[in-house]
Structure formats: C-alpha cells, structure tokens
Image: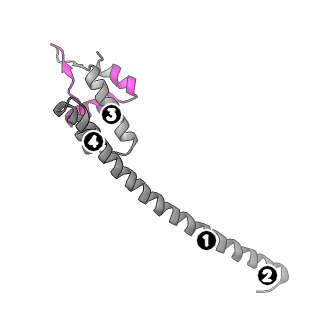
Amino acid sequence: MYTISELAKEFGLTTRSLRYYEELGMLRPMRTETGKRVYGKKEYAQLKIIMRGKKYGFSLVEIKDIVLLFDKDRTGIKQLEKTIETAGQKLNELNERIKELDGLKQDFEQVIKGFTETLHELKMNDKTGKR
C-alpha cells in the first residue's frame, strides 16, 4: 500500500498529477476512515500503464480507455487488443511524421548547398574584383 506522497515519489510525479488522474477516473484509490488516499497493487499497475502511455504519446483519453478495460475484462485480452490498436495508430502517425521530416531535411540540405555555392561564388568574385 502507498500513500499519495509515496506513490508520487515512486513515479517522479506530483501529488497534483495523481489527483488529476483520479479526477479523470483513471485511478480510484481506496480511502482510509480519515479520507486519506491509499493506493494498492492495482493502482500501481494502472499508473505504470498511464506513464508508459504518456511516454509513447498516447492521449489521456486513449490511456484512460486502456486502463479501464481491465475492469471490464479481467483476462487482459481486451486491454491488450486496445493497446495494440492504439499503438498501431501511433506507429502509422510516427511513420508519416518521419516522412515529413525526411522531406524537410532534404529541403534544408538543398538550401544549404545552394547558399554555400552562392557564398563561394561571391567570395571568388570579391577576390577577383568582379561584381
């Protein structure tokens, strides 16, 4: 069992972040008689999924869908299917972005090459007195 401070420290988060995930319905910690949040193995595992999803660029809505699927299907099959589907979409987006960036890189290389040639010509003309 973890307190909110312990879990936040474990994952390098603020307690505000954990409360926000709770507001979104992504985490549902138990409460003590005094109202303090107590996080167990389930919430720890859910937070691992949340952090992994954020790392890979999933939206909070996508992450929430994945996290909550385990409550609907304890086998984990639906959760894995949704994760694979979402990850596949992210991979396609990433591949498209890589193509865009590769095109931009080629454009920059051509611009630099052209400017370098122009600069070389200007310097040569300056040395020979041509204008």
Mark 2 highlights which residue?
125
Mark 4 highlights which residue?
81
**Which residue is located at x 23 percent, y 41 percent?**
65
Give the secondary structure at mark 3: helix
Q: Quadrant of the C terminus?
A: bottom right
**Which residue is located at x 30 percent, y 17 percent?**
2
Mark 3 highlights which residue?
49
Foreground residue among 4 and 46: 46
Query: Callout 4, which amino acid?
Result: Glu
Label 1 Cα crowd, 10 Å radius (few <14 / some 14-19 / many 20+) = few
Taking the magenta stretch, the answer to whether it contains residue 21 is yes
Which residues are the magenta region? 6-34
Query: Callout 1, which amino acid?
Result: Gln
Horizontal and vertical percent position of residue 52: 37, 36
Question: Disc 3 and disc 4: Cα gap in Å?
Answer: 14 Å
Of callouts 2 and 1, the N-terminal one: 1
Label 3 Cα crowd, 10 Å radius (few <14 / some 14-19 / many 20+) = some
Mark 1 highlights which residue?
110
Q: Residue 105 lies in what quarter of the image?
A: bottom right
* Image position of 20 (left or right of 111): left
Query: Callout 2, which amino acid?
Result: Asn
